[in-house]
Image (cartoon, helix red, strand yellow):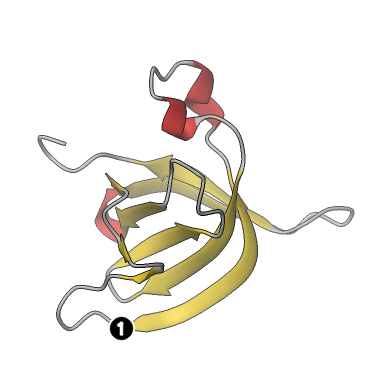
Amino acid sequence: MSINQAHYQNGLLLYHGEQIVNHSKNVKLSFDDASRQCNELFRGKHKGIVFVTTHRMIFLSSDQRDNLMSFAVAFMYMKNLHVEQPLFGANYISGVAGAHPNG
């Protein structure tokens, strides 16, 4: 997991050899455990674009004033993923994003 390290000049920053597999616009990102976090970056809902690459999932904020400009998590540090498609509501993905070692 990395915060504010996957963007550069309003664009996406990819690793060498990393390719975009899919992307979705008008995505809302929120953190359930934000009340326990000391960091203001995790509070509230963030709107932007999600990119799924060959290595990780990356969120880029569409609001330039948002303190959380980008959020990236490698697939190997994601667990308990659930894809939900409710009858009366928007589709969503939920899961746990772990920090990188020493991160």
Q: What residue does disc 1 label?
A: 19
Under circle 1, the secondary element is loop
The crowd level at tag 1 (other Cα within 10 Å; few <14, some 14-19, many 20+) is some
Residue 31 coordinates in the image, percent (x, y): 52, 35
Which sits in the foreground, 51 or 77? 51
> Which residue is drawn at the image coordinates 77% and 57% (left, top)?
90
Number of disc labels: 1
Residue 41 coordinates in the image, percent (x, y): 43, 33
Asked which quadrant contains residue 68, the reply is: top left
Type of amino acid at the residue the image marks with label 1:
Gln
Q: Is residue 57 above or below residue 40?
A: below
Residue 72 coordinates in the image, percent (x, y): 34, 55
Which sits in the foreground, 60 or 88? 60
Q: Is residue 26 above or below residue 45?
A: below
Asked which quadrant contains residue 56, the reply is: bottom left
Point out the residue furthest to the right here: 88
> Which residue is drawn at the image coordinates 25% and 73% (left, top)?
14
Which quadrant of the figure contains the C terminus? top left
Residue 42 coordinates in the image, percent (x, y): 47, 33
Which sits in the foreground, 1 or 95? 1
> Which residue is drawn at the image coordinates 24% and 79% (left, top)?
18
Q: Is residue 79 above or below residue 90?
A: above
102 left or right, relative to 21: left
96 left or right, relative to 73: right
